[in-house]
Image: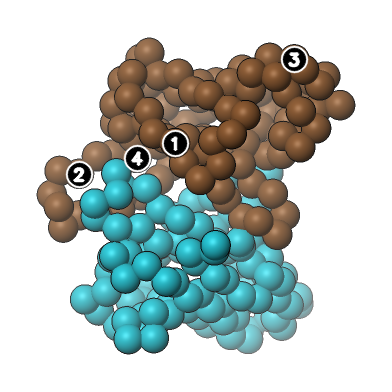
Chain colours: A brown, B cyan
């Protein structure tokens, strides 16, 4: 059974703290993604990674960084947390399909981490 | 700029009725259109997806209709049930884009008995 796990379901942090959100997948997927979900804004892509040590900025990377040292693990880092980073954070993974016609592939999501920055 | 526009943001439907959620896109490079379903406290999960070479795809009570010329696609849920109450996201992606997709803002569906 496909599984994406996130290290915490709920986190409360103070402004200025460094925050680490961890995501692990057990499907040997090449692609991994970090989104934030906010009411009225849907899912917005922060960063994604298509291979170990490779990363690409998404639509809203400001204030975030990522790390992918191992294939199964993708970390999201808030260098100095701010109140506007209070949100639900979702991690996802997908298989890479080399066929150019394959296009998008199913993304498997974790349960999310609800982060509150005070 | 919202690349995938989704409406309505919320929808209340009676049990047994048809739920309809609409999406429109701008980028003509998009060639993959999935719909994700999210229950409270859970991450989204793929419900159904379509590629632009077909105009309709049906899986059980869920149907995607696709209009390439209008750059629109929609999800129809027939015989809606209370268990269908969830948030639905449309999305769009392209073959050359590292297989990432752009999501709509979501539609919160409530099916009332």
**Circles 1 and 3: CB distance less than 8 Å?**
no
* Tag 4 and tag 2 share a subunit: yes
On the same chain, marks 4 and 3? The answer is yes
Relative depth, front residue between A116 and B36: A116
The residue nearer to you, when weighing A15 against A92, is: A15
Q: CA distance from mark 2 to mark 3?
A: 38 Å
User: At 69% across and 49% down in the image, what residue appears?
Assistant: A38
Identify the residue shown where x is 33% and y is 76%: B57
Residue B75 seen by the camera: no
- Residue on which the image places disc 3: A17
Which label was assigned to residue A94?
Answer: 4
Q: Nearer the viewer, mark 1 or mark 4?
A: 1
Question: Farthest left residue?
Answer: A99
Percent across and percent down for residue A70 are 35, 15
Relative horizontal placement of residue A2, taking residue B23 as reference (left or right): left
Q: Tag 3 or tag 2, which sits nearer the N-term?
A: 3
- Residue linked to disc 2: A97
> What kind of element bears circle 2?
loop
Which residue does the numbered mark 1 point to in the structure image? A57
Residue at point 49%, 23% (across, down): A66
- Tell me the chain of label 3: A
Other residues around mark 3 within 10 Å, as few (<14) / some (14–19) / many (≥20): few
- Mark 1 vs mark 3: same chain? yes
Mark 4, mark 3: which one is toward the viewer? 3
């Amino acid at each position: 059974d496909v599984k994406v796990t996130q290290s915490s379901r709920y986190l409360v942090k103070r402004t200025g703290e460094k925050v680490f959100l961890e995501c692990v997948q057990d499907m040997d997927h090449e692609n991994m993604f970090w989104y934030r979900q906010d009411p009225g804004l849907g899912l917005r892509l922060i960063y994604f990674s298509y291979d170990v040590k490779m990363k690409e900025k998404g639509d809203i990377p400001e204030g975030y960084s990522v790390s992918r040292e191992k294939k199964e693990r993708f970390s999201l880092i808030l260098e100095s947390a701010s109140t506007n980073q209070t949100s639900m954070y979702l991690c996802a993974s997908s298989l890479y399909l080399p066929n150019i016609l394959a296009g998008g592939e199913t993304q498997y999501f974790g349960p999310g981490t609800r982060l509150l920055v005070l | 700029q919202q690349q995938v526009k989704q409406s309505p943001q919320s929808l209340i439907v009676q049990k047994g009725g048809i739920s309809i959620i609409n999406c429109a896109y701008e980028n003509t490079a998009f060639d993959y259109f999935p719909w994700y379903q999210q229950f409270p406290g859970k991450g989204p999960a793929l419900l159904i997806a379509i590629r632009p070479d077909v105009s309709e795809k049906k899986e059980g009570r869920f149907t995607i209709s696709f209009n390439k010329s209008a750059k629109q696609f929609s999800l129809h849920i027939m015989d809606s049930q209370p268990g269908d109450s969830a948030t639905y996201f449309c999305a769009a992606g392209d073959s050359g884009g590292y297989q990432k997709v752009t999501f709509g803002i979501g539609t919160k569906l409530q099916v009332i008995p």
